[in-house]
Amino acid sequence: MNIFVASLSFDTNEADLRYAFEEFGTVDTVKIITDRDSGRSKGFGFVEMPDDDEALAAIENLNDADLDGRRVVVKKAEPRERRNDRRGGGGGGFRNDRGGRNNYNRRY
C-alpha cells in the first residue's frame, strides 16, 4: 500500500520516516518530495508497505502523531489524476491585463 505523509518537519529525512513506519512492519520504499531547485523538503512524502494490514496499522497509529516536533498527517495515498495538459510546464506565457492569454500563440 502506498501511504501519503504530510506536515513533515523540514528536518525529517527518509531514514527517520522509514524508522517510524518499520515499527509496524516491512517498508519497501520511502520518498520525501523535495524542491527541484533548492533540494529542500516540501514537507510531504510517501511510504510503500507491501502488507496492507501493517500499512493500515501504521496509518492508524501515526496519523496525528508527533514526528520531529510536528503533528503529521498519514493516510492512504490516492492515485494521481491524469492530466490532459500537454504544455509540460507550469503555465506561464503572455497574459493580458485580465489574466487571460493574448493572441501571441494563436493559430489561424
Image: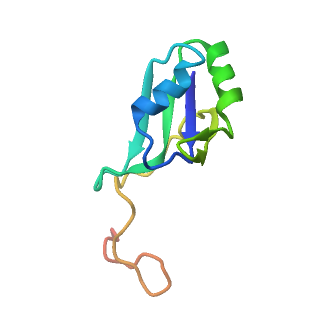
- The residue closer to the viewer here, 68 or 78, is 68
Q: Along the line of sight, which residue is nearer the eye, 12 or 26?
A: 12
Q: Position of residue 91 (x, y in %)?
A: 39, 63
Which quarter of the figure is the C terminus placed in? bottom left
Q: Quadrant of residue 105?
A: bottom left
Rendered position, 43 above or below 32: below
Across and down, in percent, residue 25 comes to 56, 14
As drawn, which residue projects farthest toward the right?
60
Q: Locate residue 1 relative to residue 88 in the image: left or right.
A: right
Figure disc tally = 0
Quadrant, the N terminus: top right
Q: Give the quarter of the image for residue 28.
A: top left
Q: Residue furthest front?
A: 69
The picture places residue 79, in percent across and down from the top left corner, at: 56, 33
Image position, residue 82 (x, y; %): 51, 40
Coloring applied to the structure: rainbow
**Residue located farthest toward the bottom when viewing the structure as drawn:** 97
The residue under the point 56% across, 44% down is 6
Left or right of residue 87: residue 3: right
91 vs 19: above or below? below
In-image side of 20 versus 53 (left or right): left
